[in-house]
């Protein structure tokens, strides 16, 4: 989500690190041009890379971008290039497809809490397609990050009741739906489907891994410290080679009403008095009142693994991956088959993490790899000024993570991953959002969406990886491991510092070849090596100030070998573009339109729900929805 209006988490007072120099020009290869030569020196040759078997026949197509750029404009629809079509699927309130329980959406927002638990939630975000019959039938699994209570209830928040809190909780979480493509390329949601499922903020799930059962995870309702109700603020995602979905708990602190006297741990995690004002769950669900239940918030901020093939399976919160305001979890494999998961923590001055599993992935799908993510090593990134970096192990007993610093067990390290990363001297980043691994080169990309506090009074100074003060536009950083993906050293540079050269006051702008953008968030390198970039400019900022020439959020395609970035899509008014997944044949791209019609203060007026946008129905209420994008000639998207 965009975070200008919401209480902006800003909880890292640590002093690390101050060793970096500012704006090392070697770090901005693409921006400065000369990419090919620079890449050859630092990242190894890209051209003519062998394609991997897992990419199928599309990986041989090359990265060339073939469509005509979409001009920026203030629109209230989805705009794609000539020769492409879009189809709206699975809007907020559409039935998920659970047999015998498919309540229709009521356009005035009057569906009950019970009905909402059987329908698409609000504010669609990260997403993955799991093929069943090649590219023609599959499961689409998607997050419902948060809610706009002004739209969710018929009269918004004019009254506030236990039923409304339950409806809000049921509009969060995850959906599993089944989709089928016909011969003409049109998609249909199969409903009912035996796979259909809603996971909500009330779904029972299990804490697993080294921190499970830890004293900080025990509550009055769960003395075992292993059984949790629900997941929420599920932002970006990952998916594993063994067929499971990873959903990431991001701004969980916003749901817990803190106290006037937070302890050091609560302060470091942004658990403060006033947090509850946004969602007001604590008024009717006591576990969100920190004064009554101080440990409940420690049970959120995890990566949750869900088996979409089994609607009766219990979601598992994987503590070995560490606790954070998790954005996403991009998964790849080492040469010997161990899982490597890259994770950004989207808060100002927080960190980038990597998990390497102890064991190799076994054949046999989810059942055979049920405990894979419970054993492994978590690292946090330090970016050094010379263009190298190091993964610092978050392992109890190493690097000063010892008992007298508060790290008695590995559970302490994982639950207090921020404090452990502070102690290790990790690099404080400009809000790390999505990560993605290029399947052809194994380069890893991460969006650093923006950080207007960078370089401000009393705030961390610029460094080589985060080189701009008052960074309103963001950047995309990338690295290549020194060796296999489990390496502890890497080389890094910036793919691009974002910004509009007509508007920006920053140095080193105007060299992006092609279209401009700001606040990059969603990110995916597809199987042929095209980097797709989605933006999340907050609705309080869209079309204003430095974003005057960017009235709408957008998606762009980048050929990283050429430094070319081209606008592919514009979204309707007041929306964020997010969620990004493709069929294996790359002939359908699914994205999510999140919060169309969101006003600048992020809460809609139930009496004027269409004030900003009429998308997608032209009437009723704006609705987050999934979009299927196809090429009219049936070709590969982006060619
Ligand atoms: Fe939910 Fe960091 O965006
Ligand atoms: Ca958003
Ligand atoms: Ca964002
Ligand atoms: Ca995001």
Image (cartoon, helix red, strand yellow):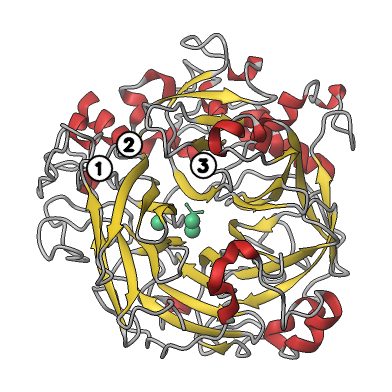
- Residue 211: x percent and y percent? 67, 24
Q: Is mark 1 within 8 Å of ligand 2?
A: no
User: Which numbered disc flags the more N-terminal residue, 1 or 3?
Assistant: 1
**Residue depicted at x 36% and y 74%:** 552
Q: Is residue 120 left or right of residue 314?
A: left
Q: Nearer the viewer, mark 3 or mark 2?
A: 3
Q: Is mark 2 within 8 Å of ligand 1?
A: no
Residue 161 shows in the view:
no
Badge 3 density bin: few <14, some 14–19, many ≥20, Cα 10 Å: many
- Circles 2 and 1 in contact, beta carbons < 8 Å: yes
Q: Is mark 3 within 8 Å of ligand 4?
A: no
* Mark 3 element type: loop
As rendered, which of 342 and 576 lies closer to the eye? 342
Badge 1 density bin: few <14, some 14–19, many ≥20, Cα 10 Å: many
User: Which numbered disc flags the more N-terminal residue, 3 or 2?
Assistant: 2
* Mark 2 element type: strand
Q: Is residue 589 left or right of residue 402?
A: left
Q: Which residue is mark 3?
A: 244
Spatial CA span between label 2 and label 1: 7 Å
Q: Which residue is mark 1?
A: 96
* Image quadrant where one finds the N terminus: bottom left
- Residue 249: x percent and y percent? 51, 40
**Residue depicted at x 44% and y 67%:** 537
Spatial CA span between label 1 and label 3: 19 Å
Q: Which residue is mark 2?
A: 198
**Residue depicted at x 30% and y 81%:** 632
- Circles 1 and 3 in contact, beta carbons < 8 Å: no
- Residue 372: x percent and y percent? 66, 34
**Residue depicted at x 35% and y 60%:** 136
Spatial CA span between label 3 and label 2: 15 Å
């Amino acid at each position: 989500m965009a975070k200008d209006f919401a209480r902006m988490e800003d909880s890292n007072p640590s002093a690390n690190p101050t060793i970096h120099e500012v704006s090392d020009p070697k770090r901005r290869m693409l921006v400065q041009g000369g990419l090919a030569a620079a890449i050859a020196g630092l990242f190894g040759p890209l051209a003519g890379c062998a394609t991997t078997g897992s990419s199928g026949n599309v990986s041989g197509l090359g990265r060339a971008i073939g469509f005509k750029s979409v001009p920026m404009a203030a629109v209230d629809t989805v705009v794609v290039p000539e020769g492409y079509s879009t189809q709206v699927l699975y809007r907020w309130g559409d039935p998920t497809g659970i047999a015998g329980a498919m309540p229709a959406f009521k356009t005035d927002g009057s569906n009950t809490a019970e009905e909402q638990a059987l329908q698409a939630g609000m504010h669609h975000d990260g997403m993955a397609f799991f093929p069943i019959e090649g590219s023609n039938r599959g499961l689409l699994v998607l997050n419902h990050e948060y809610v706009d209570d002004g739209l969710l209830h018929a009269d918004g928040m004019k009254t506030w009741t236990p039923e409304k809190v339950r409806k809000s909780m049921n509009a969060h979480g995850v959906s599993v739906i089944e989709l089928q493509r016909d011969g003409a390329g049109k998609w249909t949601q199969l409903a009912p489907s035996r796979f259909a499922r809603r996971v909500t903020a009330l779904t029972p799930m299990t804490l697993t891994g080294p921190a499970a059962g830890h004293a900080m995870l025990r509550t009055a309702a769960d003395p075992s410290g292993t059984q949790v109700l629900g997941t929420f603020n599920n932002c970006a995602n990952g998916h594993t080679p063994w067929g499971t979905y990873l959903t990431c708990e991001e701004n969980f602190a916003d749901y817990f009403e803190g106290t006037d006297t937070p302890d050091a741990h609560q302060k470091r995690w942004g658990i403060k008095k006033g947090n509850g004002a946004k969602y007001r769950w604590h008024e009717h669900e006591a576990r969100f009142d920190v004064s009554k239940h101080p440990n409940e918030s420690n049970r959120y901020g995890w990566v949750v693994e869900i088996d979409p093939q089994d609607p009766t399976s219990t979601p598992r919160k994987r503590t070995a991956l560490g606790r954070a305001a998790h954005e996403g979890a991009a998964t790849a494999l080492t040469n010997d088959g161990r899982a490597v998961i890259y994770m950004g923590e989207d808060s100002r001055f927080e960190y980038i993490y990597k998990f390497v599993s102890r064991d190799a992935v076994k054949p046999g799908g989810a059942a055979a790899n049920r405990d894979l993510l419970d054993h492994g090593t978590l690292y946090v990134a330090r970016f050094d000024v010379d263009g190298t970096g190091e993964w610092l192990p978050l392992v109890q007993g190493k690097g000063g993570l010892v008992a007298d610093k508060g790290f008695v067990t590995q559970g302490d390290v994982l639950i207090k991953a921020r404090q452990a990363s502070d102690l290790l001297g990790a690099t404080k980043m400009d809000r790390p959002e999505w990560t993605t691994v290029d399947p052809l080169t194994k380069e890893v990309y991460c969006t650093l969406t923006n950080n207007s506090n960078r370089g401000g009074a009393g705030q961390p100074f610029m460094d080589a990886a985060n080189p701009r003060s008052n960074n309103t536009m963001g950047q995309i950083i990338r690295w290549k491991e020194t060796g296999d993906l489990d390496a502890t050293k890497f080389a890094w540079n910036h793919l691009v510092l974002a910004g509009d050269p007509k508007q920006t006051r920053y140095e080193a702008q105007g060299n992006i070849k092609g279209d401009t953008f700001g606040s990059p968030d969603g990110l995916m390198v597809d199987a042929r090596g095209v980097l797709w970039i989605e933006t999340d400019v907050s609705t309080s900022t869209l079309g204003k100030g430095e974003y005057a020439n960017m009235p709408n959020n957008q998606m762009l395609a980048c050929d990283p070998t050429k430094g070319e970035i081209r606008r592919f899509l514009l979204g309707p008014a007041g929306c964020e573009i997010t969620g990004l997944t493709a069929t294996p044949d790359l002939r359908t791209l699914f994205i999510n339109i999140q919060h169309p019609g969101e006003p600048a203060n992020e809460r809609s007026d139930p009496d004027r729900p269409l004030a900003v946008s009429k998308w997608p129905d032209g009437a009723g209420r704006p609705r987050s929805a999934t979009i299927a994008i196809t090429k009219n000639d049936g070709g590969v998207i982006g060619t």
